[in-house]
Amino acid sequence: IRFFFPRLEDTLAVIKPNGMEQHREEILQEIRAGEFSIMQQKEAVLSRELAEEFYREHRDKPFFSQLVDFMCRGPCLMLVLTKENAVEEWRAMMGPTDPSEARQAAPDSLRARFARDVLENSVHGSSNAQHARQKIDFIFGEIGEENEGNVEREMGS
Ligand code: RTP
Ligand code: MG
């Protein structure tokens, strides 16, 4: 049964501002090569408020304000990726948070190749299925309604 009906899973992927500035097409190419289905996508400059809410679990970390500044500095591309085991597969494609670790542990990963440093690490991915659902609802609910003016362009897939 499982063979014929794989359990599809959604994850939220974000190409962060530095990824958009320099490596957008290469990252999208990797997503296609990974055979993820792109079910929804939205390009937007995040408001501070939205970035703070998006990363609220890190609000007490020393890097929080830098992280929010970075995420708001230019457009992000937010993508709902669907595939069997999408959460884990997308995390594996991204590699570890810190590119110096990524270059050791996962030299082909996106962060090994495209991250500038531990902050500007080019991509985000949900860490589990429940987080994925929450963040997808948050991004594709609120940006659409409240931040319409910030959505610069939607790409055709
Ligand atoms: P993400 O949530 O963006 O997919 O990244 P992650 O799970 O690999 O790492 P997480 O611990 O959730 O950190 C979120 C993002 O915060 C920035 N960061 N900066 N300066 C620092 O030491 C530092 N540590 C983390 C990164 O942009 C990281 O992806
Ligand atoms: Mg995280």
Image (cartoon, rainbow, N blue to C red):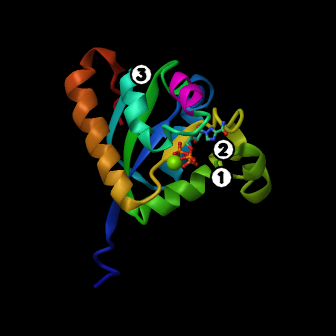
Which residue corresponds to the image point at 45% horizontal and 45% vertical from the top-left? 57
Q: Position of residue 139 (x, y in %)?
A: 31, 36
| Mark 2 secondary-structure assignment | helix
Quadrant position of the C terminus in the picture: top left
Q: Amino acid at mark 2?
A: Arg
Which residue corresponds to the image point at 28% horizontal and 85% vertical from the top-left? 1
- Classify mark 1 as within 8 Å of ligand 1 or not, answering yes or no: yes
Q: Is residue 98 left or right of residue 147?
A: right
Q: Is residue 14 magenta?
A: no
Q: Nearer the viewer, mark 2 or mark 1?
A: 1
Sequence order check, earlier mark of 3 and 1: 3
Q: Is residue 23 above or below residue 100?
A: above
Sequence order check, earlier mark of 2 and 1: 1
- Residue matched to label 1: 96
Q: Amino acid at mark 1?
A: Pro
- Residue matched to label 2: 111
Q: Gap in Å between the C-alphas at discs 3 and 2?
A: 24 Å
Crowdedness near tag 3: few (<14), some (14–19) or many (≥20) residues, C-alpha within 10 Å: some
Which residue corresponds to the image point at 65% horizontal and 52% vertical from the top-left? 96
Is 35 or 81 nearer to us in this picture? 81
Number of callouts:
3
Magenta stretch? 64-69
The answer to whether residue 101 is visible is yes
